[in-house]
Image (cartoon, helix red, strand yellow):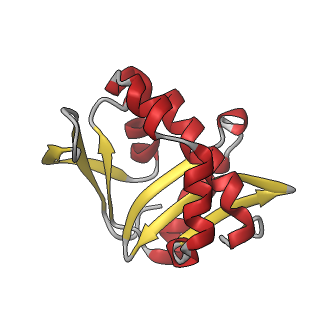
Amino acid sequence: MDNIRKAVVQDASRLAEILIFTKRINYRRIFRDDRVSFGEMQVYPLAQDYITNPEKLENIWVYDDEFVKGMLHVEGRKLTELYVDSFFQNEGIGARLMEFAIQTFDIQSLFVLEKNSSAIRFYKRHGFSLTKERRLEEGTTQYIVKMERKTGIL
């Protein structure tokens, strides 16, 4: 996976752009809270946070093909975030990041918003299945559901 590398402080701005804009596009229809989407979620403070606290980049990997187009965040064998810049979706970047996470970290589980059907389909294509475990996403009225992967399935 030669386009995937560990995130560095110089990636802070692109990471913040990808995270904020992709979350706005994908989650606004679910959460319906513009105060969060456009008030609390801002690119500059998130980029500043990565620059000030570079240890937060420790478990983040980026897909860099001339510039950063996607990212994933791994904690142990759990995938905590996978986002691809909306302009570059459906180009196989998410699949490459997911394959990298499975092969490199033997990812076994993740949580996904219950109403995010496109993400659930994506993870199912990569060997994950929904479990019965679900809980409220902190600070919201929306549920997240746990997905698990059977060992040895790519």
* Residue 99 visible to an observer of this rendering: no
Residue toward you, 76 or 56: 56
Q: Residue 7: name its quadrant.
A: bottom right
Tell which residue pokes out farthest to the right in this image: 66
Above or below: residue 126 compared with residue 100: above
Residue drawn where x is 50% and y is 30% of the image: 38
Q: Position of residue 118 (x, y in %)?
A: 44, 31
59 sits to left or right of 13: left
Above or below: residue 116 compared with residue 61: above
Q: How many marks?
A: 0
Residue drawn where x is 82% and y is 55% of the image: 67
Residue drawn where x is 22% and y is 34% of the image: 142
Above or below: residue 115 compared with residue 46: above
Residue drawn where x is 75% and y is 67% of the image: 10
114 sits to left or right of 72: left
Q: Position of residue 120 (x, y in %)?
A: 37, 39
Above or below: residue 23 compared with residue 68: above
Quadrant where the N terminus is found in the figure: bottom right
Q: Position of residue 83 (x, y in %)?
A: 55, 48
Q: Residue 117: name its quadrant.
A: top left
Residue toward you, 61 or 122: 61
Q: Position of residue 124 (x, y in %)?
A: 39, 44
* Residue 113 visible to an observer of this rendering: yes
78 sits to left or right of 4: left
